Image (cartoon, helix red, strand yellow):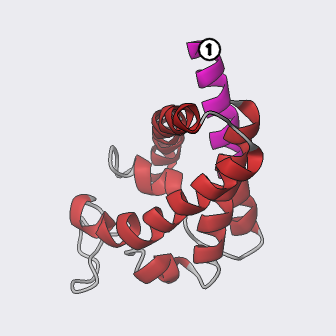
Amino acid sequence: MTWQQLIVSAIVATALQSATVAAAQGLGYTRMNLPLLLGTLVTADRSRAMTYGYALHMAVGLIFTSIYAEMFGILGKATWWLGSVMGLVHGLVVMLIVLPLIPYWHHRVATERQGPTPTRLLQPPGFLGLHYGRGTPLVTLLSHVVYGAALGILL
């Protein structure tokens, strides 16, 4: 696989994942906004945060695409269903490990024990991201399965 294929695959899969979450937001299933969370690491300006957040999400998508590609290489094949399983595991790790830790490394997200302050204005995700809506766990898993399936097809 060439680096061009890796980059194109990362862009397509990450864009599909973002579109899945955006559609779920529009339909009212979740309030989780990953570009906003990522972008507010860089700036407090919410408009600019979205732009920075999408760029950061694409960069992170490229890193994870490289990991998926390596896993496909180790397993000797890349299929949509194998990518979907990897995406499901990836989504579970995000929900069970990453989301609960966000308030402890993101300087603009309030913690469960301390509410908003002048600098910590964003709501913490909570267990399984449930503070962002009851559909957030399903949306998180589905978007990661979409990401993995896309990579299984593209790689």
Residue pointed to by mark 1: 4
Q: Say whether residue 118 is visible.
A: yes
Residue visible at 72% across and 57% down in the picture? 20
> How far across and how far down the image is residue 145, in percent?
67, 57
Work out which quarter of the rendered image holds the C terminus and state it.
top right
Identify which residue, 36 or 153, lies in the foreground: 153
- Residue 32 magenta-highlighted: no
Position of residue 26 in the picture relative to residue 144 (left or right): right
Tell me if residue 133 comes above or below residue 93 in the rendering. below
Residue visible at 28% across and 78% down in the picture? 116
Amino acid type, callout 1: Gln
Residue visible at 43% across and 57% down in the picture? 37
| Residue 143 falls in image quadrant | bottom right
> How far across and how far down the image is residue 87, in percent?
60, 55
> How far across and how far down the image is residue 107, in percent?
24, 59
Position of residue 37 in the picture relative to residue 1 (left or right): left
Specify the principal SS of the magenta part.
helix
Tell me if residue 50 comes above or below residue 73 in the rendering. below
Tell me if residue 143 comes above or below residue 39 in the rendering. below
User: Mark 1 packing: few (<14 Cα in 10 Å), some, or many (20+)?
Assistant: few
Residue visible at 49% across and 40% down in the picture? 64
| Residue 88 falls in image quadrant | bottom right
In the image, the segment drawn in magenta is 1-17
Q: Secondary structure at mark 1?
A: helix
